[in-house]
Amino acid sequence: MKPRNINLDLVRIIASFMVLSVHIGQHIGENFDVGAKGVQLFFILSGFLAFASLDSEASAIHYYKKRLIRILPTYYFCLILVYLEDIAVAVYDGVLLETLKGQCGIRFLRYVFFVHCFTPSSNWDMWNNHNALWTMSAFVGFYMVAPWLYKIIKNTYIGMVLVFGLLISRPWMMGLIQKLCSEYPKESHIEWFAASNPITELYCFVMGAVLFVAIKECRQYIYISSLLLCFILSSLDWYGYEIAFVVLVFASATSQNFTSNNKITKIVVWLSRGSFTLYLVHPIVLAVERRLWYRLDIHKEIIHGIVLYTVSILLAYFIYYCIISKIEQKISTLIPCIIKSIKM
């Protein structure tokens, strides 16, 4: 087996902390909008790793098994927390009946089945992005189509055609979605829905996937040079962050591990494994903490920021290593038994 590439683990950690930082900045009145680009970094890295996994797997079933174990336990645990938080707030505010009919009613199933960013709604914050969950529609959509993309992208040049096709057509697709949903109310924020739809975000996943194919065929410099050339020709105004992230993933994937120290390696891997839980759980932690913090009558935002980072990280990693990792292990032993029984 090849030694683990902890450079890519470090990229995953960076992406999760970028997203954490932008949300903490919103809570303490600091502008760190660049942190929101951590989502695109996650998507690009996911595309690269998905193709790497498909390249080494014996079948698509094994690939889906790994993705399900990686995503579902953390996501559904997060959904339970979101639901319980909404119920607790409703009880405290005395609006439980209204909440059970509204945000905790039947439409909450949008999140259960990952369709919340595939279909528009009457309220973006409630039905598409409650507790910053919009990306999960995209992740699941990407992972579901990855085996088909793997068959379609037979070489770097086919992949480049697909990448540039998605990049060029993205504004048109966003405009079309907004036009088709023009009758929705203002609260729908169709402009956000159009920009965050899995179809219009697919370009990130494919950029990462094609990078894997290019490296495999030793054509990575052709691929990256073409991206950089388009960026320069557009007066440095064409998917700059995404192209920079492709270069970052390329450098991380093709370089030697930044350290050979076993202790540092274990820390990086430990942080990386819990980063997805940090990514999903921290908005819930921030929402609860916000209700409690100002009761302490402390208004120093630096202290508030330190507390938010500390509490979010500690709780997220506690949840992952004490609860979710055990669920993942249990599922990993059950799935082969289920598959075996189906075949019989």
Image (spheres, grey):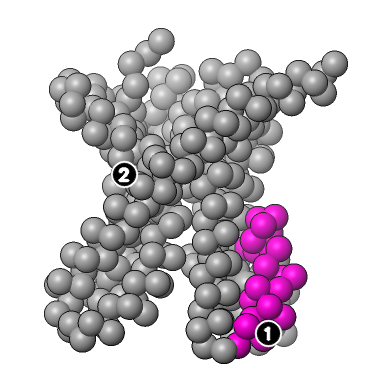
Question: Among all residues in the image, which is located at the extreme top?
Answer: 1
Residue located 39% across and 40% down the image: 321
Looking at the picture, does residue 155 appear above or below residue 322?
A: above
Q: Which residue is mark 1?
A: 97
Is residue 318 shown left or right of residue 125? left
Magenta stretch containing residue 280, yes or no? no
Query: What number of labels is visible?
Result: 2
Specify the label residue 13 is tagged with: 2
Is residue 271 shown left or right of residue 303? right
Magenta stretch containing residue 104, yes or no? yes
**Upstream in the sequence, badge 1 or badge 2?**
2
Residue located 28% across and 60% down the image: 311
The quarter holding residue 308 reads: bottom left
Looking at the picture, does residue 99 appear above or below residue 113?
A: below
Q: Position of residue 63 (x, y in %)?
A: 61, 28
The magenta-colored residue range is 95-117
